[in-house]
Image (cartoon, rainbow, N blue to C red):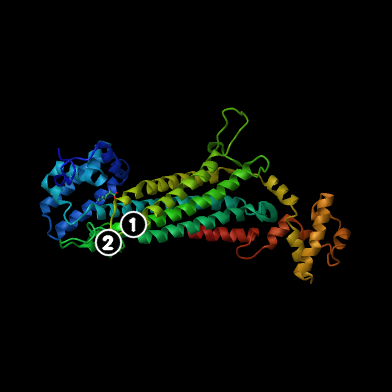
């Protein structure tokens, strides 16, 4: 029985093991709908160019409509023997409509067909992910809005640095996810080019109209070199790089959520639906979702490296290596989609504990820089001011008190420039309010930044 599309050339069938080894149908069948979409556009062009008849075209349309139904209803039988999604669908089409089905592949190869499918699939995935990033940004903006004035310690080296507002902190992530969105939209431009027409590698002898197919499928343009069109997967690698950066940002946020939720820190509580308990320790509430997201970042990074390694050193044009592009790509999309969906919801389930944040900011001499800036404004050079305040902090460490708790007379021992207007500068609220310029943490600036971020959503 000759089920393969090329078996006349061979004197023996491939072994079952080789069949299983070379088949991709059980993972590439997720491209079934775009494969049909691409085939219909190709057939329409073949007909318009007089390469197939109107009757053939009508038969192909009818057959494909039924196949689409079968796939959507779960009635389509995928056969390992037919290797991949392309041959499975073509074979079924021929079963349904006869010779017209056999004419569909005129002027086309699976090489340009699969490249087209991946691009159509990825374009849809990008549009979906851009939408999910938008949901996440919107959720974080809302959280920022509820916390424009909530003080928390800002850290460098995980040591208390300066007071900031929680709203400002959330908007830092909004910036990251906005850049991620830009990156995806930029990547989309290079994804959205049509390989079809390149055929196996050199083009085809038929009078095809590639621009017409590109327009039908919503591509911005055709790929202009047939060898390049079938062989490069740089667009998928680029997507995976953008995905790895998104997950990197998610992992940073996850790490902070985990730290903030630790009872030792206690800055936030996370809604129960994102946490799980322990099978042995009855008291436990673990931040499983952010931990898993942190872990899945490694998986997405791995997929990027897998694709780079897959492409490295491949001679032109198509090589079967490229079949290995799909699982990493699909898993990247799946991981990203699930993670972003969960995080948009998770952001709405964060309960902020302002008292704990405030207490932590109060403990770490977070306003020391404000005192130095105060002295500079009174005429002291910054380096001298830094030194004077360092001495004051040292005294506070010994006495276990905050700078604002030292009596004025004692503060004046470190600089005679200090007057009783200093105490306003030493408050946490005074400190954040004073950083009132574009990009600063002052509540007034956070409100402006929220307006900007909201405008950018649309
Ligand atoms: N399943 C193949 C892939 O994913 C389709 C192209 C196969 N072409 C070929 N000449 N073997 O790349």
Kindly report which numbered mark, 1 or 2, lies closer to the viewer in this rendering: 1
| Figure label count | 2
Residue at mark 1: 314
Residue at 60 percent of width and 58 percent of height: 447
Residue position marked by numbered label 2 in the rendering: 227
The Cα atoms of the two marked residues, 1 and 2, are separated by: 12 Å
Name the image quarter holding residue 66. top left
Question: Which residue is drawn at the image coordinates 14% and 48% (left, top)?
Answer: 102
**Foreground residue among 361 and 330:** 330
Please say whether residue 13 is visible from this viewpoint. Answer: yes
Q: Is residue 147 left or right of residue 177?
A: right
Residue 13 spot, x, y in % from top left: 19, 40
At a point 53% along the width and 37% down the height, the residue shown is: 273
| 139 left or right, relative to 154 | left
- Report the front residue among 293 and 226: 226
Q: Earlier in the sequence, mark 1 or mark 2?
A: 2
- For the residue carrying disc 1, how many other residues have a C-alpha within 10 Å: few (<14), some (14-19), or many (20+)? some
Q: Secondary structure at mark 1?
A: loop
131 lies above or below 225: above
Mark 2 residue element:
helix
| Residue at disc 1, CB closer than 8 Å to ligand 1 | no
Q: Position of residue 12 (x, y in %)?
A: 17, 40
Is any part of residue 351 visible from this angle?
A: no
Q: Tag on residue 221?
A: none
Labels 1 & 2 near each other (Cβ < 8 A): no
The x and y percentages for residue 249 are 52, 52
Within 10 Å of the Cα at label 2, are there few (<14), some (14-19), or many (20+) other Cα atoms?
A: many
Residue 395 lies left or right of residue 72; in this view the side is: right
If the image is split into quadrants, where does the N terminus sit? top left
């Amino acid at each position: 029985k000759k089920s393969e599309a090329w078996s006349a050339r061979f004197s023996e069938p491939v072994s079952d093991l080789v069949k299983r080894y070379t088949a991709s149908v059980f993972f590439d069948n997720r491209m079934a709908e775009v494969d049909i979409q691409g085939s219909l556009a190709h057939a329409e062009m073949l007909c318009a160019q007089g390469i197939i008849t109107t009757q053939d075209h009508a038969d192909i349309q009818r057959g494909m409509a039924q196949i689409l139904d079968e796939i959507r209803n779960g009635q389509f039988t995928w056969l390992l023997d037919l290797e991949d999604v392309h041959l499975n669908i073509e074979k079924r089409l021929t079963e349904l409509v006869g010779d017209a089905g056999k004419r569909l592949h005129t002027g086309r190869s699976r090489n340009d067909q699969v490249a087209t499918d991946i691009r159509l699939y990825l374009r849809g995935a990008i549009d979906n992910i851009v939408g999910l990033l938008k949901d996440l940004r919107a959720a974080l903006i809302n959280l920022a809005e509820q916390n424009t004035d909530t003080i928390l310690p800002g850290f460098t080296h995980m040591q208390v640095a300066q007071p900031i507002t929680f709203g400002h902190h959330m908007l830092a992530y909004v910036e990251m996810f906005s850049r991620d969105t830009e990156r995806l939209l930029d990547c989309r431009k290079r994804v959205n080019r049509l390989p079809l027409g390149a055929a196996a590698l050199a083009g085809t002898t038929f009078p095809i109209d590639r621009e017409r197919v590109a327009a039908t499928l919503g591509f911005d343009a055709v790929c202009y070199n047939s060898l390049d069109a079938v062989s490069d997967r740089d667009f998928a690698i680029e997507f995976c790089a953008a995905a790895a950066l998104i997950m990197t940002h998610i992992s940073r946020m996850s790490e902070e959520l985990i730290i903030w939720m630790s009872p030792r820190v206690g800055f936030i509580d996370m809604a129960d639906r994102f946490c799980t308990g322990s099978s042995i320790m009855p008291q436990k509430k673990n931040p499983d979702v952010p931990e898993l997201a942190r872990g899945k970042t490694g998986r997405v990074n791995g997929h990027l490296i897998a694709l780079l390694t897959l492409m490295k050193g491949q001679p032109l044009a198509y090589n079967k290596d490229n079949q290995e592009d799909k699982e990493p790509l699909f898993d990247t999309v799946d991981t990203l989609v699930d993670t972003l969906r969960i995080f948009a919801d998770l952001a709405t389930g964060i309960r902020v504990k302002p008292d704990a944040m405030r207490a932590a900011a109060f403990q770490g001499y977070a306003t020391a820089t404000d005192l130095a800036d105060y002295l500079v404004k009174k005429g002291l050079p910054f380096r001298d001011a830094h030194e004077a305040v360092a001495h004051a902090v040292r005294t506070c460490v010994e006495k276990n008190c905050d700078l604002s708790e030292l009596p004025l007379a004692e503060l004046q021992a470190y600089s005679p420039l200090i007057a009783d207007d200093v105490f306003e500068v030493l408050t946490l609220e005074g400190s954040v309010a004073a950083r009132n310029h574009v990009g600063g943490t002052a509540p007034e600036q956070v409100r402006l930044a929220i307006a900007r971020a909201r405008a950018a959503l649309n």
